[in-house]
Each structure stands twice: as C-alpha cells, then as structure tokens.
Image: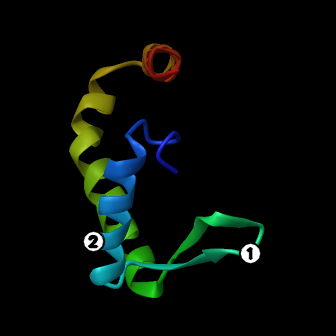
Amino acid sequence: MAQGIEVTKGAMTNTASRLAEKGYIAVRPDPNNGRGKLARLTPAGRAARNRAVSRLGRALAPLAATLPDPELHAALLTLRRARG
C-alpha cells in the first residue's frame, strides 16, 4: 500500500494503525508473508471513502465545468503521467 500511495512504509504503518483504531479498516496477518499484513475496508471505512469521493467530486465540478471534455481528458492524462 505504501508504494501505491507514494509514502514510506513507516508512514503507511502509522496511517493504517490510526484507520484501524477508528474502525475504518480491519488488519490481519498475511498468511503468505509472515512480515506482511492484509487490510480491508470495514463498512464504516467504505462509508467514509464514499463521503470523501462525493465531496471531492463536488469540489472539482466547477473546475471540470470550465474545460471542454477533450481538454479535461488531456489534463487528467497529464496528471496520471506525472504521478508515475
């Protein structure tokens, strides 16, 4: 997960611990990797994610409305490439 969101393993461990404490994720040992852990969203975590995505969509809607679709598409492609 750390690599996927471009943070250190330590930062991901701290974040995962806080999310688990709040009941947003459930963490268990990875049966295929003694040092690894598996995390999954809980129903509360899924609800929080859905709220965040909804808020983000509402926040970005005015920006998206100012660009023609081809320009918006090109901007998203550029951002994806920049992210790596």
Is 31 positioned to the left or the right of 54 in the image?
right
Q: Read off the residue under disc 1.
A: 31
Q: Name the residue located 45 percent from the left edge and 75 percent from the top edge.
A: 46
Quadrant of residue 60 within the rendered picture: top left
Is 13 positioned to the left or the right of 81 in the image?
left
Q: Secondary structure at mark 2?
A: helix
In this view of the protein, which residue sits in the foreground, 15 or 41? Answer: 15
Q: Position of residue 23 (x, y in %)?
A: 34, 85
Q: CA distance from mark 1 to mark 2?
A: 23 Å
Q: Position of residue 27 (x, y in %)?
A: 51, 78
Q: Amino acid at mark 1?
A: Pro
Q: Read off the residue under disc 2.
A: 18
Q: Amino acid at mark 2?
A: Arg
Q: Is 67 above or below relative to 39? A: above
Q: Name the residue located 33 percent from the left edge and 71 percent from the top edge.
A: 17
Q: Is 35 above or below relative to 1? A: below
Residue 80: mark = none
Q: Secondary structure at mark 1?
A: loop
Q: Say which label, 1 or 2, has the lower sequence index.
A: 2
Quadrant of residue 59 within the rendered picture: top left
